[in-house]
Image: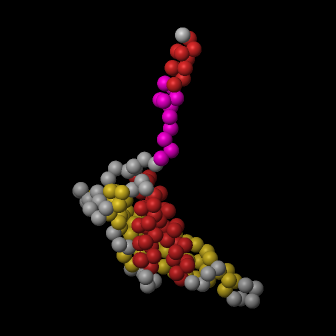
Amino acid sequence: MGRYRILGIISLFNISCSLSFTGGNIKGSIDIFPVQNESDAYGIEGILGSEIYNSFKNDGRFKISENGDYTLKVVVKGFKKEPFFYEKTGEVKGYKFTLLSDISFIRKSDTLKLLERSLREEIVSETNEDIEGIKKLAVKLKDDIIKIILELW
């Protein structure tokens, strides 16, 4: 009899202490507006927009909907590429890429801005190609946006 009681208690303990390793669902859905480009970098909005949308979709904690409960807006304010380090001969070996953007997260029901922030992303790369620099900046930007929005919950 004592053996069954102990097994019963252990079973109840195991059931009540089970852990879930899946991410929690965030209440509501998000409408991700197309990225606006106020910089001189042609086409930057397409690269950033794709990266942001795909990251939210793949993350799985956010439901994306055109009629979402919340709106995410991203505006590119500036993009700059400048020489950062040089060879001994004076030739440019690497560049610093900088992306300035404003993000806002708005609750649609009452148009309350839950978040309004300016972000500055920087990377240093040996590439001279703007597209490669923008892609690397896009990864940093989307990671920061998801982190910031998760902090709101």
Residue 53 as seen in the image, left or right of residue 29: right
Q: Residue at x 52, y 72 (%)?
A: 137
Image quarter of residue 64: bottom left
Comparing 103 with 17, the one in front is: 17
Farthest right residue in view: 88
**In the rendering, at what x and y percent does residue 79 appear?**
48, 79
Residue 131 as seen in the image, left or right of residue 56: right
Q: Residue at x 52, y 81 (%)?
A: 131
**In the rendering, at what x and y percent does residue 93 appear?**
68, 83
Tell me if residue 140 can be seen.
yes
Q: Is residue 24 above or below residue 82?
A: above
**In the rendering, at what x and y percent does residue 108 appear?**
26, 59
**In the rendering, at what x and y percent does residue 3 appear?**
57, 14
Comparing 2 with 37, the one in front is: 2
Q: How is the image coloured?
A: secondary structure
In the rendered image, residue 13 lying in the magenta stretch gets the answer: yes
Q: Residue at x 46, y 69 (%)?
A: 51
In the rendered image, residue 112 lying in the magenta stretch gets the answer: no
Q: Is residue 57 above or below residue 21?
A: below
Residue 27 as seen in the image, left or right of residue 110: right
Q: Is residue 32 above or below residue 19?
A: below
Image quarter of residue 53: bottom left
Q: Which residues are magenta?
A: 12-22
Tell me if residue 106 can be seen.
no
Image quarter of residue 148: bottom left
